[in-house]
Image (tube, rainbow, N blue to C red):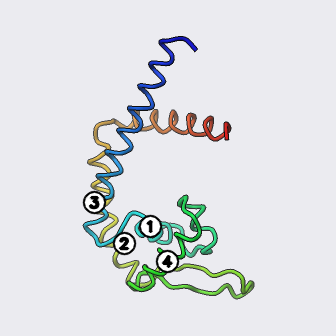
Amino acid sequence: MDRLENEVTLKLFVTLSKAHRTITDLVKEDIKKYGLNTTEFAVLELLYHKGDQPLQQIGQRILLASGTITYVVDKLEEKGYLLRKPCPKDRRITYATISDQGRALLDDIFPKHQIRLNEIFAGLNIQEKNDAISLMKKLGLYADSLS
């Protein structure tokens, strides 16, 4: 690699890192207003939009360790936002299902959260957002192939 490519690569890394941190901080701040942390919100949002999920697969879907998922599911169950439901066909599998209380919470907060996300990403037009999605996906898939 030549010097210019090294400089551009480093600048891209720093820029992506700063943007990620800033966006993540804003999203955390928004979610915190609703009495949830980002992991709790991610689990509820998954169940809200995708339906019942095996506990073993939630971690894979939102990129968390299984021990963390158990803890988060316990907390959400204590708050009354989700329920554990045994699989009728396989006793080894337990599903997480959003409760009526959890659904009511997401019915209330998700539209507000979507508005906040739109505000956070309003610095890009639709074409730029689509371009960013394509580029980040391409970069992520390539980086993933290196591991």
Mark seen at residue 100:
none
Disc 4 or disc 3, which is closer to the eye? 4
Disc 2 or disc 4, which is closer to the eye? 4
Taking 110 as reference, is 64 left or right?
A: right
> Which element is circle 2 on?
helix
Q: Residue at x 56, y 71 (%)?
A: 67
Hey, what amino acid is under mark 1? Glu
Residue annotated with mark 1? 45
Hey, what amino acid is under mark 3? Asp
Q: Residue at x 34, y 65 (%)?
A: 110
Tell me the distance, in whole angstroms, between the alpha carbons under discs 4 and 3. Answer: 21 Å
Label 2: how many Cα within 10 Å (few below 14, some 14–19, many 20+): many
Residue 108 location (% of width, % of height): 30, 72
Q: Earlier in the sequence, mark 2 or mark 4?
A: 4
Q: Residue at x 34, y 76 (%)?
A: 105
Residue annotated with mark 2? 106
Q: Earlier in the sequence, mark 1 or mark 3?
A: 3
> Which element is circle 4 on?
helix
Mark seen at residue 30:
3
Question: Disc 1, disc 3: CB below 8 Å?
Answer: no
Taking 100 as reference, is 89 left or right?
A: right
Label 4: how many Cα within 10 Å (few below 14, some 14–19, many 20+): many
